[in-house]
Image: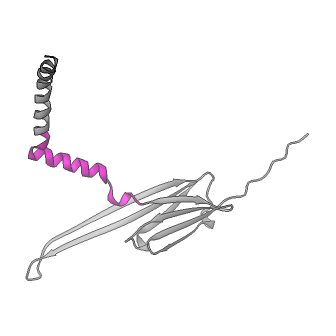
Amino acid sequence: MSDHKKKVRNEPFGDIMKSMNQFFHEKPVRGFMQTMDDFFKNPFPAAHFHVEVSETDDAHIISAELPGINKEQIQLDVLDNYITITINQLKSLTEEDENRQITRRHQSFQRSSRTIPLPQPINEKKVKANYKNGLLQIKVPKQKGKTIFLED
């Protein structure tokens, strides 16, 4: 008897869940939900480039994986103890018909950046950067501090 009561008690809740499930699987809502899922999985496709910061005795090494990016698309900026890597991408799409007539042309500009904080101000004149085979490496020399001796 207790199993029967439990089943009866869950039915209204089951109907609500069934209605909600149907609502989320109807075409307009399902399409919207899929778009939202895609957005949160990858909101800014080019914004997510992998950056790794390592340290040696005399420098901070910043490495960024940028496959498919040309050197001319990379911009580096230094302000105080921050270094910003910016990627500028201009994408162009042209569609032609069978007579090689342009039927559609689409251009989009996308900018993505990552800002990396370092524990000390950066002397931009001493920063070295190179880009090869999709890997950007930035070497930021550490600044030597001054030792202050205590007076007696």
**What residue appears at the point 48 percent right and 59 percent down from the top-left corner?**
51
Where residue 8 appears, x then y in whole percent?
Answer: 11, 21
**In the drawing, does residue 96 fall left or right of residue 62?**
left
- How many marks do you count on the picture? 0
Q: Which corner quadrant of the image does residue 10 belong to?
A: top left
Check residue 39 for magenta coloring.
Answer: yes
Left or right position of 132 against 149: left
The one nearer the camera, 121 or 31, is: 31
Quadrant the N terminus occupies: top left
In the image: residue 69, left or right of residue 38: right
Left or right: 47 in relation to 75: left
Please name whichever residue, 2 or 76, is drawn nearer the observer in this view of the structure: 2
**Which residues fall within the magenta stretch?**
23-49
Q: Compared with residue 99, is residue 44 higher up or lower down, i.e. above or below?
A: above
- Most extreme residue toward the right, as rendered? 152
> Residue at 61% across / 58% down in the picture?
122
**Which residue is most to the front?**
1
Whether 33 is among the magenta residues is yes
Using the image as rendered, state which of residue 121 and residue 130 is in the foreground.
130
**Picture layout, residue 15 above or below residue 77:** above
Give the image quarter of residue 22.
top left
Looking at the picture, tell me which residue is in the foreground, 8 or 41.
8
Tell me residue 103's x, y (percent).
11, 73
Q: Residue at x 63, y 52 (%)?
A: 120
- Examine the rendered structure and indicate whether residue 136 appears above or below residue 29: below
Q: Is residue 38 above or below residue 61?
A: above
Give the main secondary structure of the magenta stretch: helix
Q: Quadrant of the C terminus?
A: top right
- Residue 114: percent from the left, percent from the top? 45, 56
Please state the horizontal and vertical placement of residue 32, each as a whole percent of the image. 17, 47
